Amino acid sequence: MVERPWLAHYPAGVDWHVKITPRPLWDLVDAAARDYPDRPAMDFMGKRFSYRQLGEMVNQAAAGFQALGVTKGTKVGLFLPNCPQFIVSFFAVLKAGGTVVNYSPLYAERELLYQVEDSETDLMVTLDLEALYPKMAQVMRESRIKRLIVGSLSDVLPFPKNFLFPIVRPKDIAVVTWDDKHISFRDLLRFGEKPTPIAVNPVEDVAVLQYTGGTTGTPKGAMLTHANLYVNAVQSRLWTAEAEVGSERMLGVLPFFHAFALTGVMTMGILIAAEIVMLPKFELNEVMKAIARRKPTLMAGVPTMFRAFLNHPAAKEGALRSLKACFSGGAPLPLELKRAFEAESGCKLFEGYGLTECSPVASGNPYSGKNKEGSIGLPMPATDILIVDRDDPMKELPLGEVGEIAIVGPQVMKGYWRRPDATAETIVNGRLLTGDLGRMDEEGYTYIVDREKDLILVSGYNVFPRVVEEALYEHPSVAEAVVIGIPDPYRGEAPKAFVALKPGHNSVTADTIKEFLRPRIGKHEMPVEIEIRPSLPKTMVGKLSKKELKDEELAKRQAAAAKVS
């Protein structure tokens, strides 16, 4: 292994060589309930729960899960938005001995059925919302699911919202078929005060099956152990040493079913006994109201969220000034967005890097110390980042050369559930191969060049979409930009750009954008087409969706070809 250049530039007070003792993940809740019992743990639409209450509900729900048959290794699905029932269920399943399987509320029935059968999920927790319950009830009828635990938002909303909720929005509430396969979340908490203790080997026992890879093929379940997730929460906390235990308020708007929020908001937040100010989904006006009401100090988000904040009128009035630090991940952070957000909010916006298979945090720009714009920062404590040859992952490349990013550390997953071949391809001699291309500078800071699968081969030349996207973001009228490769009869492939403009900039044309790009990128990098849209498609966590745009483009070309033939 090449020498670790980051050691000489590590932030003061953070020990890269730290040895973190793995613990069962539910210890986070137990410790916070013991040490900060009266501290607010959760704020949901104005209703607050203390850490004492959270600890009690986790114990009660764990006893309930055991009464329903959950034991070592039983898979329990969470089909929930951000809400108190998510956090309670998550830790209760683990404390009962089970394994959590996260399900996106945006999944179609077919996707849900696949994941239920592949993961061997036996119980599912959901809410009595029209957007969730009917879909999951149908899945239960067609799958192995034995019991459905159904909660209600009215149980966790403050008065008078809890009284008004079903009256004001009756169309949103589903009619639940209460039979022996259904149990209410309230009844789940009535089986007992504490569960039977379960012995856990944190290093070996899987806490979460987190499905990933849906954008590149059949989704696979990353087996994240108690140790993976506990250690990653501690690594994240060590990286933000200036955060005050028992004093911070964490904005929880990233979906908890996603690995970024699971660690970046939920487990790290509980580790520092922060108050998690959660919202069920990202509705900008509601988020701004929550910020005004609870004045969060910390936030993890994706670039599109920070862009949306900047475009809200309240941002100009100082609405974001309570924030001390924000952490951006999930997608590249454009430099102009970082600078504009920091100027408007007065807080630091740090770019980091991770992936589901890493629980997910692997690197970040230091909370204190040198921040390098455009970089994903330094490796987390006890973590190595290597730049390896794309054809030989055991060959490390010199500093400055572009290769595949590989990660070694205690947060790296155990493997893919029931996918030994995929595991062997992804983890080679302990090195997690990310599929991302990058380089490392002389101080150990890593720079993402692009996803290997997103490379565009133009007349034999590599075109990195991110380079073109960064140039597009320099245009003062561009709000969002995505670049993909499309077939080209002469060059093989060519770049195509999709752009959404900022409000009030509708006079900008594709031709004027091309003129802007000419001095900034090479001829082979120039998009052959720039399509301007009112907005660009997003993934379930708010990232710009290249996959959807690629699928649209493919469908369009197939339709055109069919018309010709």
Image (tube, rainbow, N blue to C red):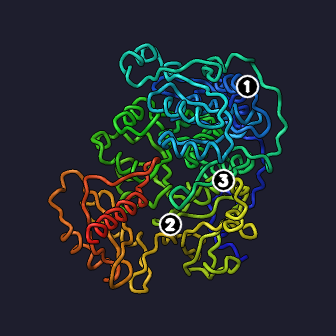
Q: Nearer the viewer, residue 546 or 307?
A: 546
Of pointers 3 and 2, the one earlier in the residue sequence: 3
The amino acid at mark 2 is Ser
Q: Which residue is mark 1?
A: 68
Label whose residue precedes the other's in the sequence (3 or 1): 1
Left or right: residue 69 versus residue 114 is right
Q: Nearer the viewer, mark 3 or mark 2?
A: 3
**Kind of residue sitting beneath label 1:** Leu
Q: Is 58 situated above or below 298?
A: above
Judge the density around disc 1: few (<14), some (14-19), many (≥20) Cα neighbours within 10 Å. Answer: some
The single residue placed furthest to the right in the displayed view is 199
Q: CA distance from mark 3 to mark 1?
A: 26 Å
Rendering coords of residue 405 (x, y %): 60, 70
Q: Is residue 507 left or right of residue 42?
A: left
Circles 3 and 1 in contact, beta carbons < 8 Å: no
Q: Is residue 449 left or right of residue 59?
A: left
Helix, strand or loop for disc 3 = strand
Residue flagged by tag 3: what amino acid is it?
A: Ala
- Marks 1 and 2, Cα distance to the nearest angstrom? 48 Å
Instruction: Decide which of tag 1 and tag 2 comes sooner along the chain.
Output: 1
Q: Are marks 3 and 2 in contact (CB under 8 Å)?
A: no
**Which quadrant of the structure image shows residue 435?**
bottom right
Nearer to us in this view, 561 or 238: 561
Q: Which residue is mark 3?
A: 222
How far is the residue under mark 3 from the one under mark 2? 26 Å
Farthest-out residue, left: 507
The residue wearing badge 2 is 375
Q: Please rate how many residues cluster around mark 3, counting C-alpha atoms within 10 Å: few if below 14, some from 14 to 19, many from 20.
A: many
The residue at the point 58 percent across, 27 percent down is 40
Question: For residue 527, what is the image quadrant?
Answer: bottom left
Residue plotted at (23% across, 69% down)? 513
Where residue 259 sits in the image (x, y, percent)?
58, 48
